[in-house]
Amino acid sequence: MNMGKFNYISLEEARTRAMEEKYIVADLRSPQEFYYSHVDNAINVPNPTVEKIAQYNKKDYTWILYCRRGSLSFKLASELSDCGYKVLAVVGGYKE
């Protein structure tokens, strides 16, 4: 579903795409939350900023972002989109 600058996807869709090439799944939660549970193949990017994402040098990939409730991932998705990144944000966050 397209909502302007970036698209929203479900957590299940994120899990599926995490296994595909050209997608990077970023868990924006704390390292403790990430350790407890996360999407397979996700990387942990706590206290995320555009600059932190840029350090990965993967602008040609589609970034899938999730956080606890969704608000942080939506904010960062908008900022990354403004910088030319392809971004998907998980609706509702990660509650597992």
Image (cartoon, rainbow, N blue to C red):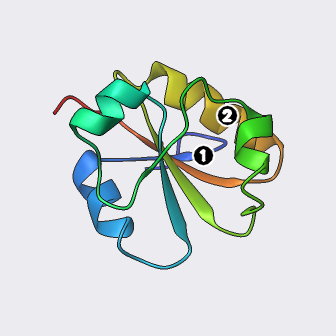
Residue at numbered disc 1 = 6
Q: Which residue occupies the foreground of this view, 59 or 55?
A: 55
Disc 2 from disc 1: Cα separation = 7 Å
| Residue furthest bottom in the image | 21
The residue drawn where x is 60% and y is 23% is: 47
Q: Quadrant of residue 62?
A: bottom right
Marks 2,1: beta carbons within 8 A: yes
Relative to 32, is 34 above or below?
below
Query: For mark 2, what is the residue?
Result: 78
Which amino acid type is marked by label 2? Ser
- Residue located at (43% from left, 24% from top): 30
Q: Position of residue 29 (x, y in %)?
A: 42, 27
Question: Left of 29 or right of it: where is 40?
Answer: left
Tell me if 83 is positioned left or right of 7 in this view.
right
The three-letter amino acid code for the residue at tag 1 is: Phe
**Image position, residue 26 (x, y; %):** 49, 46
Position of residue 47 relative to residue 42, above or below, is: above
Label 1 sits on a secondary structure element that is loop
